[in-house]
Image (cartoon, helix red, strand yellow):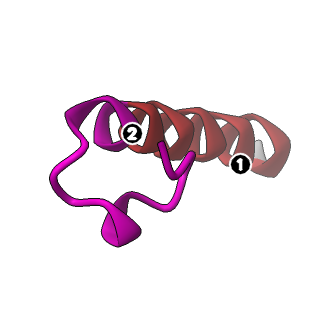
Amino acid sequence: GCGICASCCPTNAIDIRYFRDYQLFTEIDGMLEGG
């Protein structure tokens, strides 16, 4: 797979799912750090 580079492999559903989970994690992490 292409890891978090979902745009590189739009046909790879697993990588897209991983990328979306990664985005969600970074958003939550940013919210926690930002207060």
Residue 26, how many percent across, how many down?
64, 44
Q: Residues within 10 Å of mark 2 (few under 14, many from 20)?
A: many
| Depicted 10 relative to depicted 34: above or below | below
Front residue of this view, candidates 27 and 17: 17
In the rendered image of this protein, does residue 30 appear above or below residue 32? below
Q: Is residue 2 magenta?
A: yes
Q: Left or right: 35 with respect to 7?
A: right
Quarter placement of the C terminus: top right
Which residue of the protein is positioned furthest toward the left in this rendering?
11
Question: Residue 7 appears at what percent x and percent y?
Answer: 33, 70
Horizontal side of 7 relative to 24 (left or right) equals: left
Q: Is residue 4 left or right of residue 11?
A: right
Residue 33 placement (x, y as % from top left): 84, 43
Would you identify the image quadrant in which residue 8 lies?
bottom left
Tag 2 residue: 15
Q: Position of residue 24 (x, y in %)?
A: 47, 37
* Labels 2 and 1: the sequence-earlier one: 2
Residue closest to the eye, 27 or 7 = 7
Amino acid type for the residue under numbered disc 2: Asp
Say what secondary structure mark 2 lies in: helix
- Amino acid under disc 1: Gly
Judge from the rendering whether residue 16 lies leftward or rightward of residue 27; answer left or right.
left
- In this picture, which residue range is highlighted in magenta? 1-17
Is the residue marked by circle 1 packed among few (<14), some (14-19), or many (20+) residues within 10 Å? few
At horizontal 15% and vertical 52% (from top left) the residue drawn is 11
Q: Quadrant of residue 10?
A: bottom left
Element type at mark 1: helix
Q: Which residue is mark 1?
A: 30
